[in-house]
Image (cartoon, rainbow, N blue to C red):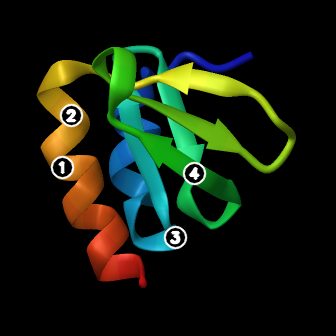
Amino acid sequence: TTSKNLKYYSEILSEYSFYRIHSATLINLMYLRKFSKSIGGYVIMEDGSELSVSKNRKNGLLEALSLNS
């Protein structure tokens, strides 16, 4: 349990390949398997989970992925 909000952790972890894809979702880009632009955009993680990407954060995610490559 923590009293900090997700923005706090997002800022701290951004230098460790974490990216906030939605208001309540922070992912580690090292475990991202695939990004799909269909249906508004979603990611598939290594464990097979599918997570939606916010419209406002899609371009930032694409930029973060190009920097991580």
State the separation of the CA atoms marked 3 and 2: 18 Å
Q: Secondary structure at mark 4?
A: strand
In the figure, is residue 67 to the left or right of 50?
A: left
Which of pointers 4 and 1 lies earlier in the amino acid sequence?
Answer: 4
Q: How many marks?
A: 4
Q: Are marks 2 and 1 in contact (CB under 8 Å)?
A: yes
Residue position marked by numbered label 4 in the rendering: 34
Residue sitting at x 65%, y 25%: 50
Q: Give the labeled residue for mark 2.
A: 57
Is the residue marked by circle 1 packed among few (<14), some (14-19), or many (20+) residues within 10 Å? some
Q: Marks 3 and 4: which is nearer the front?
A: 4
Q: Secondary structure beneath disc 3?
A: helix
Amino acid carrying label 2: it is Arg
As shown in the figure, which amino acid type bears the numbered disc 3? Tyr
Mark nearer the viewer, 4 or 1: 4
Mark with earlier residue (3, 2): 3
Q: Nearer the viewer, mark 2 or mark 4?
A: 4
